[in-house]
Amino acid sequence: MSVPIYWRNVRYKYRLIGTRCKKCGNVTYPPRVVCPKCRSREMEEIELPRRGKLITFTIVRSPPSGFEKYAPYALGIVELENGVKVIAQLTDIDLEKIQSGMAVEAVFRKYKENFEDGIIEYGIKFRPLLKQ
Ligand code: ZN
Protein backbone atom coordinates (compact mmCIF):
# COMPACT_ATOMS: atom_id res chain seq x y z
CA MET A 1 0.00 0.00 0.00
CA SER A 2 1.46 3.36 -1.00
CA VAL A 3 1.83 6.11 1.54
CA PRO A 4 -0.60 8.56 -0.11
CA ILE A 5 -3.40 5.97 -0.19
CA TYR A 6 -2.70 5.00 3.39
CA TRP A 7 -3.02 8.58 4.54
CA ARG A 8 -6.12 9.15 2.49
CA ASN A 9 -7.82 6.19 4.16
CA VAL A 10 -6.80 7.33 7.60
CA ARG A 11 -8.16 10.76 6.87
CA TYR A 12 -11.56 9.38 6.00
CA LYS A 13 -11.79 6.77 8.70
CA TYR A 14 -10.36 8.43 11.76
CA ARG A 15 -11.60 11.96 11.30
CA LEU A 16 -15.02 13.36 10.79
CA ILE A 17 -14.87 14.57 7.19
CA GLY A 18 -17.82 16.36 5.62
CA THR A 19 -18.23 18.53 2.57
CA ARG A 20 -19.02 22.22 2.18
CA CYS A 21 -20.64 23.71 -0.89
CA LYS A 22 -18.48 26.49 -2.32
CA LYS A 23 -21.55 28.22 -3.75
CA CYS A 24 -24.10 28.25 -0.93
CA GLY A 25 -21.99 27.21 2.07
CA ASN A 26 -24.18 24.24 2.93
CA VAL A 27 -22.28 21.65 5.00
CA THR A 28 -23.16 17.98 4.68
CA TYR A 29 -22.22 14.76 6.39
CA PRO A 30 -21.53 12.18 5.06
CA PRO A 31 -19.57 13.87 2.24
CA ARG A 32 -21.56 14.55 -0.94
CA VAL A 33 -20.53 15.06 -4.54
CA VAL A 34 -23.55 17.26 -5.28
CA CYS A 35 -24.93 19.89 -2.91
CA PRO A 36 -28.43 18.77 -1.81
CA LYS A 37 -29.48 22.43 -1.47
CA CYS A 38 -28.37 24.12 -4.68
CA ARG A 39 -27.23 21.12 -6.81
CA SER A 40 -23.75 22.62 -7.23
CA ARG A 41 -20.89 20.18 -7.76
CA GLU A 42 -18.32 22.52 -6.29
CA MET A 43 -17.94 20.71 -3.00
CA GLU A 44 -14.85 20.90 -0.80
CA GLU A 45 -13.93 18.59 2.05
CA ILE A 46 -13.80 19.98 5.56
CA GLU A 47 -13.07 18.42 8.91
CA LEU A 48 -16.07 18.61 11.21
CA PRO A 49 -15.88 19.23 14.96
CA ARG A 50 -15.92 15.98 16.92
CA ARG A 51 -18.03 17.32 19.76
CA GLY A 52 -21.69 18.05 19.81
CA LYS A 53 -25.02 17.68 21.55
CA LEU A 54 -27.44 14.77 21.32
CA ILE A 55 -30.67 16.20 19.87
CA THR A 56 -32.77 13.06 19.94
CA PHE A 57 -32.32 9.31 19.83
CA THR A 58 -34.13 6.06 19.32
CA ILE A 59 -33.49 2.55 20.60
CA VAL A 60 -33.33 0.11 17.71
CA ARG A 61 -34.67 -3.31 18.67
CA SER A 62 -35.46 -4.65 15.19
CA PRO A 63 -32.36 -3.73 13.20
CA PRO A 64 -31.80 -4.08 9.47
CA SER A 65 -30.29 -7.27 8.10
CA GLY A 66 -26.70 -7.78 9.20
CA PHE A 67 -27.06 -5.86 12.46
CA GLU A 68 -29.24 -8.35 14.37
CA LYS A 69 -26.57 -9.37 16.85
CA TYR A 70 -25.96 -5.75 17.89
CA ALA A 71 -29.55 -5.06 18.91
CA PRO A 72 -30.73 -3.34 20.93
CA TYR A 73 -28.62 -0.29 20.18
CA ALA A 74 -29.16 3.45 20.20
CA LEU A 75 -29.23 5.60 17.09
CA GLY A 76 -28.96 9.32 17.69
CA ILE A 77 -29.08 12.64 15.90
CA VAL A 78 -26.14 14.73 17.03
CA GLU A 79 -25.78 18.44 16.39
CA LEU A 80 -22.09 19.20 16.06
CA GLU A 81 -20.53 22.40 17.37
CA ASN A 82 -20.85 23.98 13.93
CA GLY A 83 -24.55 23.13 13.68
CA VAL A 84 -24.23 20.19 11.28
CA LYS A 85 -26.49 17.28 12.19
CA VAL A 86 -25.13 13.74 12.04
CA ILE A 87 -27.03 10.48 12.44
CA ALA A 88 -24.88 7.86 14.13
CA GLN A 89 -24.90 5.01 16.58
CA LEU A 90 -24.28 5.81 20.25
CA THR A 91 -21.71 3.77 22.16
CA ASP A 92 -20.08 3.37 25.59
CA ILE A 93 -23.28 4.10 27.51
CA ASP A 94 -26.16 2.18 29.08
CA LEU A 95 -29.25 2.57 26.94
CA GLU A 96 -31.21 3.62 30.03
CA LYS A 97 -28.82 6.50 30.72
CA ILE A 98 -29.03 8.18 27.34
CA GLN A 99 -30.63 11.63 27.51
CA SER A 100 -31.43 14.18 24.86
CA GLY A 101 -29.25 17.24 25.28
CA MET A 102 -26.23 15.39 26.60
CA ALA A 103 -22.76 16.35 25.36
CA VAL A 104 -21.19 13.74 23.10
CA GLU A 105 -18.02 13.25 21.09
CA ALA A 106 -17.19 11.22 18.00
CA VAL A 107 -15.10 8.10 18.45
CA PHE A 108 -13.87 5.47 16.04
CA ARG A 109 -15.49 2.10 16.67
CA LYS A 110 -16.16 -1.26 15.13
CA TYR A 111 -19.35 -0.94 13.16
CA LYS A 112 -20.14 -4.30 11.66
CA GLU A 113 -18.47 -7.67 11.24
CA ASN A 114 -18.88 -9.76 8.16
CA PHE A 115 -18.02 -13.28 9.22
CA GLU A 116 -18.22 -14.74 5.74
CA ASP A 117 -15.31 -12.79 4.34
CA GLY A 118 -13.76 -11.73 7.64
CA ILE A 119 -14.21 -8.03 6.98
CA ILE A 120 -14.68 -5.76 9.96
CA GLU A 121 -16.04 -2.35 9.11
CA TYR A 122 -15.22 0.64 11.25
CA GLY A 123 -16.97 3.93 11.48
CA ILE A 124 -17.82 6.94 13.57
CA LYS A 125 -19.98 6.54 16.65
CA PHE A 126 -20.76 8.98 19.44
CA ARG A 127 -20.16 8.48 23.16
CA PRO A 128 -20.86 10.69 26.16
CA LEU A 129 -18.26 13.45 26.42
CA LEU A 130 -15.78 12.39 29.09
CA LYS A 131 -15.27 14.86 31.91
CA GLN A 132 -11.77 16.31 31.87
ZN1 ZN B 1 -24.93 24.48 -2.38
Image (spheres, rainbow, N blue to C red):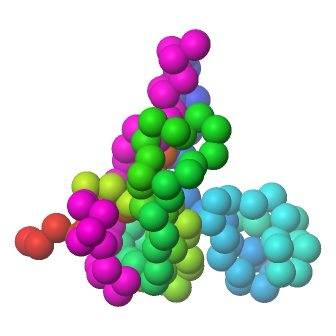
Q: Quadrant of residue 51?
A: bottom left
Which quarter of the figure has residue 92?
Answer: bottom left
Does residue 5 belong to the magenta stretch? no
- Asked whether, in this view, residue 117 is left or right of residue 10, the answer is right
Residue 98 part of the magenta-drawn span: yes
Question: Is 5 on the left-hand or right-hand side of 91?
Answer: right
Quarter of the picture containing the N terminus is top right
Q: Is residue 16 above or below residue 102?
A: above
Which residue reaches farthest right? Answer: 39
Where does residue 88 sit, x and y in percent of width and height?
50, 61
- Magenta range is 93-121
Q: Position of residue 47 (x, y in %)?
A: 51, 64
Against 94, residue 99 (above or below) is below
Q: Is residue 22 visible?
A: yes
Asked if residue 36 lies left or right of residue 16, the reply is right
Name the quadrant where ligand 1 sits.
bottom right
Residue plotted at (30% across, 63% down): 95
Q: Which residue is farthest front?
A: 62
Q: Residue at x 57, y 49 (%)?
A: 63
